[in-house]
Amino acid sequence: PHKEGGMVALSVLTMAAPTVMGMKLGPAPSPDLRYVSPPASDAANAIARPAIYPVTLFPEIAPHKEGMLDVGDGHKLYYDVSGNPDGVPAIFLHGGPGAGCSPRCRRFFDPQHYRIVILDQRGSGKSTPNAADDLEGSLVENNTPALVSDIEALRSHLGIEKWGLVLGGSWGSTLALAYAQAHPDRCEALLLRGVFLFGPDEVQYLFTEGGTYGQNPQAWEEYRRFIRETSDDWARESTNLLGAYWQRLTGEDLEMRKAAAAAFVGYELSISKTFIDPAVLAEYLGTPSILIPFAVMEVHYMLHGGFLRRGQLLDGVGVMAAHGHRVAIAHGRGDYVCQPQAAWRLSEALRAAGCADVELEFVAGAGHSDSEPGLVDAMVRATERFKAVLQA
């Protein structure tokens, strides 16, 4: 897509997929695992019996307020509020982009202390239009500056003076940093998991240059195989895998769109945890309202460099230091999606800029997902530590 007059123009939607693809896949099984590498062995059955850590999630909690916020451009965003109505405002920013939130996201915060807000970003989750229902509409003005503005709109709508804590994981960490640097007077602390700075090296490692091949060779080969087996010009498309996925995700062949989404998301999920849970693969790959936004939004943002200037988030840490932001980072030592080097570079840049409260914890035995027991432990400990310094 390209920008025309501030709108995203989806010229690719007019392309007939069968005329540009090498084959038609036909109806897919559900979940579609045809191009997903099988999990590594788990003789200890760690999926059913995960390691026990001192700290776990808080109990399930229901929201006391729900709504759909009209932010313009045809988008209405789902949000809900739970916990202490008079507590420290805290917002959870989901990953992807496009992954959406779940009730589980509320459980990283003590509901007695925090006023917990979760938000489905443009095109995803319960927000409308969802990319699975209206692809073109979901992509209108779907970019980082717009998402940052949406967080501000929600803050104002809820009558919140400033966020005490902004929690973001993976793409959510990117968005949290972008928000904190754009509106530094509207937040006090950040908790980041699986840091992604949207540097060219990070995008190339994950999606274009095969950086994951070293530890996950079959996953990378399956990611490539889908394009190779559906291409009529592999020599060209092999040099632009993200562009090839985008063409299939936005073409007119619905079965091809679904298959491309399953191959793309399946690749990422197959490298996201130390122990891959087949049930999680089935949930994501078998639910179009989750699968399609996850794939479409992630490729959309990857093709556009996250709608960020190169190096923007590292260059912007000075404003965070100037406003006294506190930053906690939890990153899995075995994260093959977002490399630990990103967390290290961010923490060093924050300290060099003068941030007085920066805590980086590399978690042994953990991958990328916030369902990793070690990352849950680290993240909840961080929200608990912030209670001592964040007051309503």
Image (cartoon, rainbow, N blue to C red):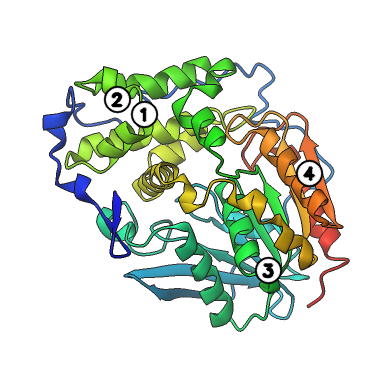
Q: Is residue 193 above or below residue 84?
A: above
Residue 255 location in percent, x, y? 22, 36
Q: Give how far across and how far down residue 168 sits, in percent.
A: 63, 54
Inter-mark Cα distance, 3 to 2: 41 Å
Crowd band around label 1 with a 10 angstrom C-alpha radius: few (<14), some (14–19), many (20+): some
Q: Kindly identify the amino acid type of the residue bearing the numbered disc 1.
A: Leu
Residue type highlighted by circle 4: Glu
- Using the image, tell me which numbered label, if any, was put on residue 125: none
- Could you tell me if the residues under marks 4 and 1 are in contact, i.e. CB atoms within 8 Å? no
x 55%, y 28%: residue: 271
Q: Quadrant of residue 113?
A: bottom right
The residue that mark 1 highlights is 241
Label 3 CA crowd tier, 10 Å (few <14, some 14–19, many 20+): many
Q: Which residue is mark 2?
A: 237
Residue labelled with disc 3: 184
User: Which secondary structure, mark 2?
Assistant: helix
Q: Are marks 1 and 2 in contact (CB under 8 Å)?
A: yes
Q: Nearer the viewer, residue 145 or 159?
A: 145
Q: Which residue is mark 4?
A: 348
